[in-house]
């Protein structure tokens, strides 16, 4: 019996060790989950549609995380998290603190807020701006993958087909200077970018929205094509009325080849070229890096006036239904 008792004690000791080990493992697992949850709580939350799965710089597979990629109405009373940068002067940690950007309650296209953008003389943002006397105020949505991390999707990558929309309000007293050869005023552009580690290309944007004013009144002209490779450059132009909101919508397929195209609508009416074409076609990418959206005002040198304009209801989606259904 004593030997049996000793055996029982041995068995009980083994069981106790196993139970203790299992309990410790359970505690470790619980602690791990709590730790991960704590880490998750400390990470700033962004809409899941604004992050794509990590990829390496060598991967070329288009990745689009969801149908609605951006829905920016400024309804939090500030600029949302759908932008990777701001071309503003002066540069501030909070863009709304800059002289270039403000969130206002009037005029608004929808909801309670809109974005006010101001470009004043000498509002140079980059060294190139200072060298060539160019001025700007822009929201930047740079869709580049760096160090294996893709921020905000792969929107402008080869083969991707996207829908964009925004509303713009140009005041009745808005000034356009046409006495200089650098009289361009770009109010939206899809720009190229260099490969990782490269420097800025200096290329003109493959797609851009220009404001113009003539004896015929105010107009928006959309240019399409690769100027630095010899074009051809195609255009769509539509008259607009200042002092009221104008709704713009764009359908783009990004491509380095003949599969690229652009379609555009103003206030729900499809825009046409001077030849009656409703779709501009051809290459709209200079290299494999995705085109990215810059939205605001970028103007040429020799313009000494202060320009103010407003944006609201900025959206990006993978389908027209998703874009219009928000």
Image (cartoon, grey):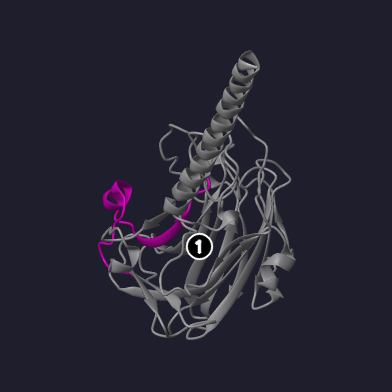
The residue where tag 1 is placed is 188
What residue is shown at x 48% (from left), y 76% (from top)? 214
Q: Position of residue 283 (x, y in %)?
A: 65, 45
Asked whether, in this view, residue 302 is left or right of residue 43, the answer is: left
What residue is shown at x 26% (from left), y 61% (from top)? 90
Residue 121 shown in magenta? yes
Q: Position of residue 206 (x, y in %)?
A: 56, 50
Asked which secondary structure carries label 1, the reply is strand
Q: Is residue 321 above or below residue 196?
A: below
Q: Residues within 10 Å of mark 1 (few under 14, many from 20)?
A: many
Q: Quadrant of the C terminus?
A: bottom right
What residue is shown at x 57% (from left), y 42% (from top)? 230
Asked whether, in this view, residue 177 is left or right of residue 22, the answer is: left
Q: Position of residue 129 (x, y in %)?
A: 31, 52
The image quadrant that residue 298 belongs to is bottom left
Q: Position of residue 189 (x, y in %)?
A: 51, 58
Residues 270 and 239: in front is 270
- Residue 274: tell me if it is visible: no
- Residue 225: tell me if it is visible: yes
Q: Residue furthest front?
A: 1
Q: Residue furthest top?
A: 3
Q: Quadrant of the N terminus?
A: top right
Find the magenta span and give its range: 119-145
Residue 281 shown in magenta? no
């Amino acid at each position: 019996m004593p030997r049996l008792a000793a055996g029982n004690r041995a068995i009980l000791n083994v069981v106790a060790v196993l139970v203790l080990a299992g309990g410790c493992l359970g505690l470790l697992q619980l602690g791990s989950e709590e730790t991960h949850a704590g880490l998750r709580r400390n990470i700033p939350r962004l809409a899941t549609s604004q992050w794509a799965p990590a990829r390496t710089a060598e991967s070329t597979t288009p990745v689009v995380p969801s149908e609605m990629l951006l829905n920016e109405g400024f309804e939090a009373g500030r600029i949302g998290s759908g932008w990777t940068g701001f071309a503003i002067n002066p540069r501030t940690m909070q863009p709304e603190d800059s002289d270039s950007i403000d969130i206002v309650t009037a005029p608004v296209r929808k909801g309670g807020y809109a974005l006010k953008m101001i470009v004043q003389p000498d509002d140079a943002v980059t060294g190139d701006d200072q060298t060539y006397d160019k001025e700007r105020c822009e929201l930047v949505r740079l869709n580049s993958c760096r160090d294996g991390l893709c921020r905000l999707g792969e929107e402008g990558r080869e083969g991707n087909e996207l829908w964009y929309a925004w509303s713009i309000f140009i005041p009745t007293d808005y000034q356009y200077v046409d006495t200089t050869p650098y009289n361009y005023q770009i109010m939206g552009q899809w720009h190229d970018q260099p490969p990782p580690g490269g420097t800025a290309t200096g290329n003109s944007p493959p797609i851009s929205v220009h404001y113009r004013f003539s004896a015929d009144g105010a107009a928006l002209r959309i240019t399409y094509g690769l100027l630095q490779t010899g074009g051809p450059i195609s255009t769509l132009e539509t008259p607009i009325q200042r002092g009221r909101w104008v709704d713009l919508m764009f359908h783009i397929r990004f491509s380095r080849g003949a599969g690229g195209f652009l379609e555009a609508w103003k206030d729900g009416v499809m825009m046409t070229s001077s030849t009656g074409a409703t779709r501009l076609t051809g290459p709209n990418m200079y290299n494999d890096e995705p085109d990215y959206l810059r939205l605001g005002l970028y103007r040429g040198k020799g313009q000494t006036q202060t320009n103010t304009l407003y944006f609201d209801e900025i959206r990006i989606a993978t389908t027209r239904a998703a874009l219009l259904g928000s």
